[in-house]
Image (spheres, grey):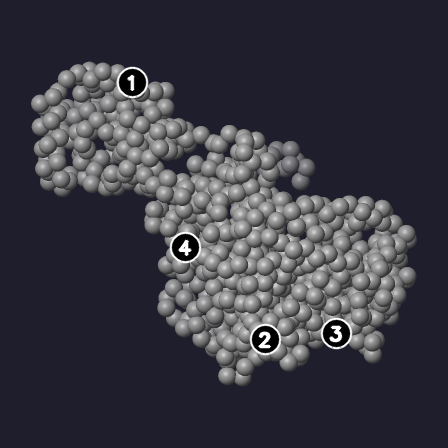
Amino acid sequence: MNANLCVRCLDRLLSSFTPSTPLKISNFSSRPRLKLFSTVSTNSRPRPKTKHQSATRRPPCGVLAKRLTGSTYIKEGNGNVRYYTNKKNGKNPSALFIPVPVKIASNPDDINIGEEFGTDLSKKKDELMDLLLTFSKRREIKAVASENGLDDHLFHQAFVSFRKYIADSETLEPDLHIVLSDILVGGGHVDDILPYFLEHARCVFPHLDCIEDLKKISDLTDPANWYPEARAIERKIIFHAGPTNSGKTYHALESFSKAETAVYCGPLKLLANEVHKRTNDSGVNCDLITGEERRYADPDGHPSGHVACTVEMTSTTQPYEVAVIDEIQMLRDPSRGWAWTRALLGVNAKEIHLCGEEAAIPLLRELLTSTGESIEVRRYKRLTPLKILDKSLDSLENIRPGDCIVAFSKNDIFYLSRKLEEMGHECAVIYGSLPPGTKLGQAEKFNDPEDTCKILVATDAIGMGLNLSIRRVIFYSVTKPMIKEDGEKEIDKISTSQALQIAGRAGRYGLSYEQGEATTFHDRDLPILKEILATKVEQIEACGLHPTAEQIELFAYHLPDATLSNLIDIFVSLSKVDSNYFVCNIDDFKFLADMIQHIALNLRTRYVFCCAPINKKHAFICTAFLKFARRYSQNQALTFDWFCHQIDWPLAVPRNLRDLMHLEAVHDVMDVYLWFSYRFMDMFPHGDMVREIQRELDDIIKQGVIHITKLIHASEKKMDDIANLPDDEIERKKALGKKGEPSPNVSDDSLTSLGSGLSSKLSETLINNGVISPEMLQLLKKEFQGDDSRKKRKKPKNTRGNNNSR
C-alpha cells in the first residue's frame, strides 16, 4: 500500500467533504478509466482517449450472411467487412474472456485507516451486501458499465468478484472504505461506488484496458500487405482452368522445368514427390520439401534451383522465377485454405501459374485486384471423353478389369474387397490413412498390365495425387459423412466438385483407356449422380486465413493469464476480415492446445506443437503426442532408443485388421516425430534413424494390405468363434476371479465339468484376435466388478408373502 497516496486521498476527502448527489450519466466522462478521485491501485496504466472509446459497444449492424467453421460473420451494409462473433453453439463471445482472480487485501500492519475515519464494516456485513446488490441493479450503472466495455455477462462476473473482494478483505483501501461507510450512514449515494467497481473490473478483465489494441492485432482486412517481398516485385499471374485430365498441370509444369529457379506447391506429399521424381528424371535437379522430409538432389545437400513442396511449406521470402500452385480451388477449404491464400498472396515469384477449377476465377480476380495485379486465364478441355452410363453395376458379378469401386467408409472397403476375393478377383485397396508409399505400391500393382490385379477398391483418396489406369469409376454410394459447422457428423450428398474429381479419374490420357466411364453400384443412386454432375460448380466466395504465431504472441502480451486455446478463441471472436476471406477452422489446433495446456512450454513452442499433423481421432497418436510434449518440457532429448520403446519397435506383420490399423497409427506417429525433427532439431535428434525404420514399417504395411482379405477373414473368423462360445463356457469365465481362481461359491466338480471349453482365457482370446484393446478390457472389468458389488449390496425382500411361498 502506498502510504503517501493514502494520506493525499484522505486529506482531499476531509477538506472537500460534501454530501454526494445521485449519479447522472452526463456527469461522467466516457473514458474507460472513470475516476472521481485518486485510488490506491498501482496497477492502473493511463491510456490516451480514442474516438472508439466514447461509443457503446454494439455488434455491427447488418445481416447475417453466412456460417463458416462454426463461427458466424456479419456483413456490413457496404458488403466489405465481416466481423467474426464466434457464436458457435450460441455461445456469447464475451464468455470467452475468463475472469482473473483478484488477490484479497490483507492487513499485515494491523492499521485500518479507513476504519479510523469511517465505520467498522465488519459489523454491517448484511447492510453492505444489500447496498452492493442495489448498486448492481441500477440501470444507470449498467449503462455506464456498458460504455466501458462491460456487457451483461462481463458485468455480472465483475460484480460477483467485486462483492467477494469487499466481503473477504480484511482491510479495504481507505478511500473505498470511507465511501462505503458514508453511504451506509446516509452521507453518500450508492452510485459513488462506480469508480471503484470499474477499477476492479479492469483487474478482473485485463482486456478492457487494451481492447482497441487487441482489435488492431486481429484486424485481418488486408492480408496482401503481410508479404512485402511479393508486393515489391511485378508478378505475372496465369490461371490454367480445366477439369480433371485436361492437361492444365502438365502445361504449368513445362514452365516450371524451363525456368532457372522454380517452386511447385502441391496439396499432397504424393504430388510433390511425383513432381520431384519427374523433374529429376528429366535432368533438372529438384529438391523435395514436405513437413516431414527434406530431400536434396545434390549429394552434398546444397539447395537446388527447383523445389517441389507441399503448399504449407511454401517460402514467401525466397525469390523464384516461376511458381506453380496446384489445386488452387482448395483455398476455400475450411481447414487448410489459409495455406493456398498465403501461397497466392505471398510467393515471391515473377511468374505464377495457378491450376484448378474455373469456379475460382471470380474470387482470384478480386484478390489480385487488391494487390494491383491482373490474371491471364487459359482454359482447357478434357483430353479423353467421360461417359456417364445409363445402367448401374447392380451386382459384383458385373465387375470388369479396369473397374474402380469408390466407397466412402473403411467398412465398405473391407466388405467389397472380401467379396471380390471370394469371387476370384484380385483387387488393390487404397484409402486415406494408408501411408503414401503403400498407396503408390497399390497404384503400381493396379496399373501394371502384367499383374493379375485388375480391380481397385478405394475411397475418395484417389481424387488427386495418383495416376491410375481406370476404365470405369463405380460409386458405391453418393453420400458420405460430413462435418457440420457445430462439429457434429452428418451424412450428405457429395458435392459436384467432389463427384467430378472422382469420376474424372476414369480414362486417364496416355494410359490404357482412351475413354472414361462412370456409374453407380445401386440403381437408386444413378439419377442422383447424374443430377450432381449436371449441376454447375458453385463459385468460390472466400478464401481462408489463419492467425500467425506473432499475432498470438502479441495477444498473449496483453492477456498473460489466458491459455493458448482461449487466446485463439478471443482472436477469432475479435477478428475482422474482408468479404473475400474467412478465418479457418481452428478446432484441431484448440484440441491440441487443451491437451498440452498442463505441460510447461513457452508460448512459441506451444504454438508449434499445436500445428503438428495429429489425427485426434486415434488415441495412440494423441498419447504419443502428449509424451513428446512432456519429455520436451523436461528438456530431455527424444532419442531413437526412447522412441523405439514407446512404439514397441520392432513390429510384426499384421494378423488382423486391428493390427493393420495400429501399424498405420504408428506410421503417423513416426511422421509426427519427423515433423518435429525439422523444427526442434536438438530435441528430436534422430530423424534419419526414424526414417529408416519408417521405411521398414511401410514394407510391413504393404504386406498386410496385399493380404488384406486374409486379415478380414481372420477378424471375422475370430468374431464368429467368440459369438459361438457355449453358454457354460461364458458362465465359467464369469465364475473366475481376478487371478483366474474359482469363486468360493463354485464347486470344484462344476469347474471340472466346464473345463472342456477354450484352453485360454476369454480376455486373452479377445485381445489376441484384435476384437478389443487392453484398455477396453480394463473398462469391462470395472463394469463387471461394479455390477457384482451392487448385487452384493442389494438385499432380498423378505416379505411374509415370499416366506410363505418358499
Could you say which quadrant of the image residue 801 lies in? top right
Q: Going from the N terminus, do you reach mark 3 or mark 4 first?
A: 3
Q: Going from the N terminus, do you reach mark 4 or mark 2 first?
A: 2
Disc 1 vs disc 4: Cβ atoms closer than 8 Å?
A: no
Residue type (three-letter) at the residue carrying disc 3: Glu
Q: Nearer the viewer, mark 4 or mark 2?
A: 2
Q: Going from the N terminus, do you reach mark 3 or mark 2 first?
A: 2
Above or below, 488 relative to 517: above
Query: Dot 3: few (<14), some (14–19), or many (≥20) neighbours within 10 Å?
Result: some
Could you say which quadrant of the image residue 387 lies in? bottom right
Q: Which residue is mark 1?
A: 24
Q: Which residue is mark 3?
A: 444
Residue at 35 percent of width and 33 percent of height: 51
Residue type (three-letter) at the residue carrying disc 4: Glu
User: Foreground residue, 798 or 559?
Assistant: 559
* Label 1 SS: loop
Spatial separation of the CA atoms under disc 3 and disc 2: 23 Å
User: Foreground residue, 801 or 280?
Assistant: 280
Q: Which residue is mark 2?
A: 286
Residue type (three-letter) at the residue carrying disc 2: Cys
